Amino acid sequence: MSTKESLKYEVNGTEMTPEEIKTDMTRIYPSKVARKRAKHIMVNKVCDDGCVPEIESNVRTIPGIITQRGCSYAGCKGVVLGPTRDIVNITHGPVGCSFYSWLTRRNQTKPEAETDENFMTYCFTTDMQEEDIVFGGEKKLKACIQEAYDLFKPKAISIFSTCPVGLIGDDVHAVAKEMKEKLGVNVFAFSCEGYKGVSQSAGHHIANNGLFTHIIGLDDTIKKGKYKVNLLGEYNIGGDAFELERIFDKCGITLHSTFSGNSTYDGFANSHTADLNTVMCHRSINYVAEMMEKKYGIPWFKVDFIGAAATAKSLRKIAAYFEDPELIAKVEEVIAEEMPEVEMVMADVKTRCNGKTAALVVGGSRAHHYQELFSEIGMTTLMAGYEFGHRDDYEGRKVIPTIKVDADSRNIEELEVSADEVRYKPRKSAEELAKLKEEGIDWADYVGMMPEMKDGAFVIDDISQYETDYIIENLKPDIFCAGIKEKYAVQKHGIPLKQLHSYDYGGPYAGFKGAVNFYKDIDRMVNSKIWGYSKAPWDLNPELSAAFANS
């Protein structure tokens, strides 16, 4: 994508610059709020050296703007740990919070046998009542762990704290330690109370720390496989991981462990024996990749399997890492086999979608990755943003040293990690890493979303409902991509919304076949005439009006 071509806008028949639109968008706010929001709303501009405007993110939401963010508990339980099928995940808190003990993002799993454990469809909770909050809930938590163990005999039990637990001071870690000794299985807890941090991002970090402390490294068994790769930050929504498993298997690459789509406890425990970590979702799980590199010597790099071209690029990157001509040739063979169908559907869909526009507010790296899929069928992204992104997700990891560490960030524990005296084994020498870097492998790096967006596009962090409405009414995107919280409010504007947290009932959208599915779904949505028939009540019946009567 050229970053030099700046987008132009026409609002209500008048040509406006992006800066004029930004000013108009924030005009409704009180001056103090407008100043704060202006730091979260950027007009993208990519300089020749790749620098982009500095955006403020990962700070507390301004009260009253109706954020789309989730809480720390949702990030820890709902995102990172939830998709693991053989851990009993107990929510210690009121049953309302425990809704997240059921998975709601369509994370899929596939046990190897029908008799294998799969707890993902269960909802485990202590269901705290008022008396538990007054007198403490530790006894109830112990009883809940015992009951779960007696019923299911799981390999591991994890406990997730909700807001009341932190407020009353239940020591979930002491309970976990006591029950671990009593039951003889791994029991561990997360202090992921919803109020910790400014969004679900804090919960991701807490979950990563817990995985690294309590599970990773427990099993040193060296498993079979010539090219052993861990895939981090792929959550198997709508079957994405199944499509990637198919591609990896076809290429001869061993998918050693996944975090956390279609994942298992044993996979986590043994993941440190793989030879490479690949990271899909930068925000949710980069912490684990960094800690495994320091302790065990496993290099990591960012990959993107959303879009056919991105998938081909990532496969070539993995093949280049192993430097085996046999693997490099096999990857090229697979790409050559898969691309014709993708290109045929892409060309057909492009005839109907070319020139249309999209807006995306999706977490992780999704708001970045999906822009390439839209561009492949001729669609332009006018606006993109994250609910829980940090500056490095927007601007790239080169800005990490300049990010201010505030009190909310300090609230999340940073583990001190050093090389394991016995098991630290660099997979590549410093010379080999340097040589591969010269050939294009960007170790432990992420370029960020903004450098790959067009000049003049809007980048909005922690978007409010009002700003969402403004974007729709004035920029008029042909499709809006977000989550369930935004879905029906957006559709009432008469444009389609594609959920990219759960895919509605579509997918998979990763890999080659996923690209084909996405092209077809977007074609159906943006070219459906039904949206033209949708009228808001105030468009059908004028609002009541009145005039003062003169006496």
Image (cartoon, rainbow, N blue to C red):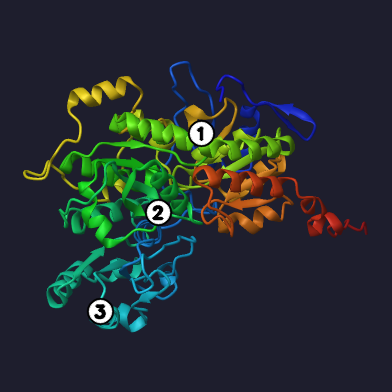
Residue 461 tag number: none
- In the rendered structure, which amino acid carries the disc numbered 2? Gln
How many numbered callouts?
A: 3
Dot 2, how many residues are within 10 Å of its Cα: few (below 14), some (14-19), or many (20+)?
many
Label 3 environment density (alpha carbons within 10 Å; few <14, some 14–19, many ≥20)? some
Mark 3 and mark 2 lie on one chain; the one further toward the N terminus is: 3
- Residue placed most toward the observer, 267 or 345: 345
Residue occupying the point 62% across, 48% down: 466
Which image quadrant: the C terminus? bottom right
Q: Position of residue 214 (x, y in %)?
A: 19, 59
Which amino acid type is marked by label 3? Tyr
Q: Which mark is residue 336?
A: 1
Whether residues under marks 1 and 2 lie with C-beta atoms below 8 angstroms apart, the answer is no
Residue lying at the far top in this picture: please name it: 48
The answer to whether the residue labelled 3 contacts the one labelled 2, judged by CB atoms less than 8 Å apart, is no
The CA span between labels 3 and 1 is: 50 Å
